[in-house]
Amino acid sequence: MKNLSIILIILTGFLHAQFAEVTVQTEVQRLNDRERQELQGLEDAISQFFTSSPWEDEVADLEMFLDIQFVFQSTISIGNETYYQAQVVLSNRQDQRFFIKDANFPYSPGRSVNLTPAFDPLASLLEFYAYLLIAGELDTYELLAGSPYYTKAKSLATLGENDPHVNRGWTDRIRLAERLAANQDLRRAKTHFYQALDMLAEEEPALDELRAALSQFYKSINAVVTREGQDRHMSVFLSGHAEEVAEMMALAGMWNELAEMMILNPDSERIYRSYLEGGSSK
């Protein structure tokens, strides 16, 4: 029997939150009845962790959305604690998505999940991905603005790598933080894209400035593909914004670049093609 519980927390009247809306889903069909019962309260604890933790003031106004899905696989006993093993997907609902194939943490009824300087298998796992999400969001505001948070994520993953019970997966997380931080072309592309998007919101966009921002965006994306091939994180970002990219390039008359986007982001080929065909018929 499949047990799927969903908790949606929407903070109203709270204007300064890094994570303004959080949805948590748990799938526990592979666990026995006792293990399922012991997970009661986990969804609320995770939601509270993201919405109530005292994150840094400098990112207080981000107001990000977050969806998390836990698919529990099994449990193991270590000492007198039950450790749950799960796969997890985290998404900001638009252009960032992370998959955890080997989450491993202890949990028992009533256990709180709090931001803490000491390493905690579950809280630190959530904190690590919070930093990645914050870093990716900050990169949309200013060039490479997320760098301090990629550094925080890497430092946290190093603590996890040294934990004797849950070290599996943390070495990969160190590499993930390093790889995302080092992919400066993608990070620059995000900034240039949002610069162009801000211009599009103006009553009368300056097309020369729009073309300049989009040209920098296109060059950065091209550089990622040349170096990395079809980078997964780039594909998630581009697919989340394909309609906007196509609309802006069509407005700016950047037909060659728009045609190239079908190769750079094949998952969204249909969207780019529709704008190309519409533009060519005018």
Image (cartoon, grey):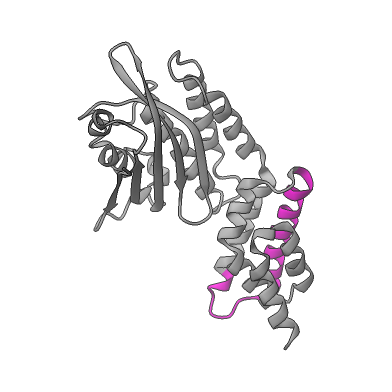
Vertical comparison of 4 with 104: above or below: below
Give the residue displayed 61% in from the left and 30% down from the top.
Answer: 175
Q: Residue at x 57, y 62 (%)?
A: 241
Residue 127: image location, x then y, percent = 41, 34
- Quadrant the N terminus occupies: top left
- Residue 17: x, y in percent? 34, 49
Write the residue at 67% across / 44% down.
184
Instruction: Identify the image quadrant of residue 183.
Output: top right
Percent from the top left, x then y, of residue 277? 72, 80
Q: Residue at x 68, y 70 (%)?
A: 272
- The magenta region covers 199-227
Q: Quadrant of residue 41?
A: top left
Q: How many marks do you count on the picture?
A: 0
Q: Which residue, as the protein is rendered here, is positioned at the far bottom?
A: 282
Q: Is residue 187 visible?
A: no
- Residue 134 horizontal side relative to residue 145, left or right: left
Q: Is residue 53 visible?
A: yes
* Residue 203 forms part of the magenta stretch: yes
**157 in relation to 149, above or below:** above
View extreme (top): residue: 79
Vertical side of 202 occupied by 183: above or below: above
Q: Nearer the viewer, residue 20 or 164?
A: 164
Image quarter (top left, top right, bottom left or bottom right) of the C terminus:
bottom right
Q: Depth check: 153 or 227 in front? A: 227
Q: Residue furthest front?
A: 1
- Give how far across and how far down residue 267 sits, in percent: 65, 59
> What's the magenta bit mostly, secondary-structure-wise?
helix
Q: Is residue 218 a member of the stretch shown in magenta? A: yes
User: Relative to 123, is 4 above or below?
Assistant: below
